[in-house]
Image: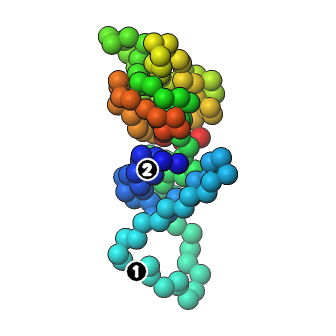
Amino acid sequence: MNVREIRALLELLREYGLSEMEIEREGVRLRLRRETGVPAPPPPLTPSPPPAAVPAREAPRVAALTVDAPMVGTFYRASAPDAQPYVREGDVVKKGQVVGIIEAMKLMNEIESTTPGRIVKVLVDNAQPVEYGQPLFLLEP
């Protein structure tokens, strides 16, 4: 993992209010923990009733994955400057669905989703240079 990837992950921790995240890729395990400055309350002495159901739109995000750049190049969200993006935040994608393009050495390479899920966040701007392995999309399975 490079510094850019770690910074993107730290931004996700902050943005979604997560206190901890663990990722393993290519045999490297990284655990990020964010201290909130507020000590955790002591555990209750008596069992408490289960919490009320949280509405689906406010449910906490769990086990988010990323769609990563398979090469170095320039990332494009659409097939042409005036075309609609392949995907937007909130879209549901299938495994193998094209989510963007990376131009490398004057060749346009389609980037496909590696798993089915919902696009939670687009992590790269259109026409931005990307590095190998850089997260492009945050995907919720």
Chain-order first, disc 2 or disc 1:
2
Residue sitting nearer the eye, 97 or 33: 33
Q: Between label 2 and label 1, give the one nearer the viewer.
A: 2
Q: Residue furthest right?
A: 27
The residue wearing badge 2 is 3
- Crowd tier of the residue under label 2, counting other residues whose Cα lies within 10 Å: few below 14, some 14–19, many 20 or above: few
Residue 55, compared with residue 72, is above or below; it is below
Q: Residue furthest left?
A: 82
Residue sitting nearer the eye, 130 or 119: 130
Q: Is residue 90 visible?
A: no
Mark 2 in CB contact with mark 1 (< 8 angstroms): no
- Find numbered disc 2 in the image and state the secondary structure of the residue it sits on: helix
Residue occupying image coordinates x 38% and y 29%: 129
Residue occupying image coordinates x 62% and y 48%: 25
Residue 42, compared with residue 68, is above or below; it is below
Tally the marks: 2
Could you tell me residue 32's position as x and y percent?
Answer: 49, 61
Which amino acid does the dot numbered 2 rest on? Val
Give the CA separation, mark 2 to mark 1.
Answer: 29 Å
Residue occupying image coordinates x 33% and y 13%: 81
Q: Residue furthest front?
A: 105
Q: Is residue 25 visible?
A: yes
Could you tell me residue 92's position as x and y percent?
Answer: 53, 30
Q: Quadrant of the C terminus?
A: top right
Which amino acid does the dot numbered 1 rest on? Pro
- Find numbered disc 1 in the image and state the secondary structure of the residue it sits on: loop
Q: Which label number is shown at residue 39?
A: 1
